[in-house]
Amino acid sequence: MQSEALHAGDAGGHALPRDTDVLVIGAGVSGLACALALLQDGRGVTVIDAGRIGGGASHGNCGTITPSHAPPLAAPGTITRALKWMFTPDAPLYIPARFDPALWRWLGGFARRCNHHDWLQSARAKSALLNDSRARLADWIATHGLDCEFTESGEDYVFHTQSAMDKELRELPMLREFGIASEVIDGPAFEAQEPALKPGVAGAIRFSGDAALRPDKYVAELARAVRERGGTILEHCALHALEADAEGVRATTAAGELRARDAVVAAGAWSPLLASTIGLRWLRKAIQPGKGYSITYSAPGLVPRRPLTLREVSVCVTAWPSGFRLGSTMEFSGYDDSLNERRLGALERGARKYLHAPVGPELRERWFGWRPMSRDDIPLIGRAPGHRHLWLATGHGMMGVGMSAGTGQLLADLVAGRAPAVDPAAFDPARFA
């Protein structure tokens, strides 16, 4: 399950340095990617996390690297669907009816983005970072020897109904403009190519540029690479206070105090809970936790040849040499830490509609995690408004793994004052301040 909140814990017996060049807060995929990119720049790095390495949303997602997923959640019709599904607890997008002023304020800002103009703007920004990160990730895998079951497999979107497929087809011209290649395959041809599927497929869209990896192994390998390059990582080391001044930052942690020239907040879905601690109260209004679920099994006898997104049921299917995972769903229920059996069951029910072998013989893990959902579905990457030495790398929504390498390099470029490969304007945290 998710790692514990970032205001509890100890340093796990490790010594906290008195001074460090860069302090990274959060040892998930974004924080470790930033740490690695900064180390490659010659910066010294200390990473702290209140929980364990990769204990949050980095752990249990489906591990797909998907430039094809550039279209944002904030799309025309999303709010209407969410309201319709409010009393359907196993719906793909679920907002339980409850009193939560922070959520409803966030939803108000989110709803204002659910128009074609803003949807296109978000899609353009996301695609730029996803494309950059996809190419950069392959380089990182080779350069750092990251053993994480990475495969340049592509991904297939599968449809049972022509109407659902037609809706998706309307987005392909835009995706092609963003450099995202696709191939449309009719139902009979796709069934012949993919024996794991039951009959009745209307068609599929193949995104050959997508890839996949085992996310928990990827995060563990990032941590190894960080340590091998001289970085320090302290688990169970909560941040209690952070003060920034013209010379740098002073952090008070569960293991003591340290000074740093720069600090990077990469705390994922916990970032809003740190808003007061780091002096950025507006951050509470910018990000909400979006709860996702997954179930991991040993591999069934018949697995798909590449990752699948079963579109009508919003279930992602990923098979690695080491396991088989069903995942997805989006639930806005705050930091509710219960494992919702009905929503887990929806993953299996959805997979059964499409797959001959929807589950494996051995159940290995049932998981939930909170993704950091920004109001515009674009991450916050850059200098914190009003601060010279405080930086943000958070709010990646469902794309944290896929955007990780690009995020790390973009952040390192901005800290160094270089012109980055990706235009940083859309990711500037100041848009929420």
Image (spheres, helix red, strand yellow):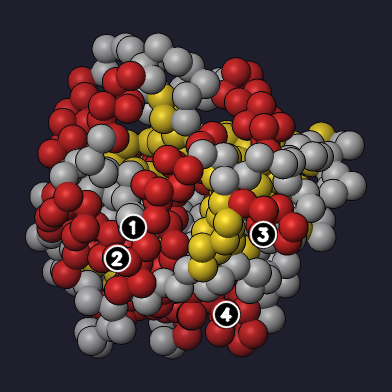
Asked if the residue under mark 1 is in contact with the one under mark 4, i.e. CB atoms within 8 Å, the reply is no
Q: Residue at x 64, y 85 (%)?
A: 142
Q: Nearer the viewer, mark 4 or mark 1?
A: 1
Q: Nearer the viewer, mark 4 or mark 3?
A: 3
Task: Relative to 247, say whether 57 is above or below.
Answer: above
Q: Is residue 378 visible?
A: yes
Q: Amino acid at mark 1?
A: Glu
Q: Which residue is mark 1?
A: 171
Q: Are marks 2 and 4 in contact (CB under 8 Å)?
A: no
Q: CA distance from mark 3 to mark 2?
A: 25 Å
Query: Do the CB atoms of the residues marked 2 and 1 lie less than 8 Å apart?
Result: yes
Report which residue position mark 3 lands on: 189
In front of the other: 86 or 186: 186
| Residue drawn at (38%, 20%) of the image | 85
- Mark 3: few/some/many CA within 10 Å (<14, 14-19, 20+): few
Other-residue count near label 4 (Cα within 10 Å), few / some / many at <14 / 14–19 / ≥20: some
Disc 2 marks a residue whose amino acid type is Met
The first of marks 3 and 2 along the sequence is 2
Secondary element at tag 2: helix
Q: Position of residue 254 (x, y in %)?
A: 47, 45
Q: CA distance from mark 4 to mark 1?
A: 26 Å
Residue 138 image label: 4
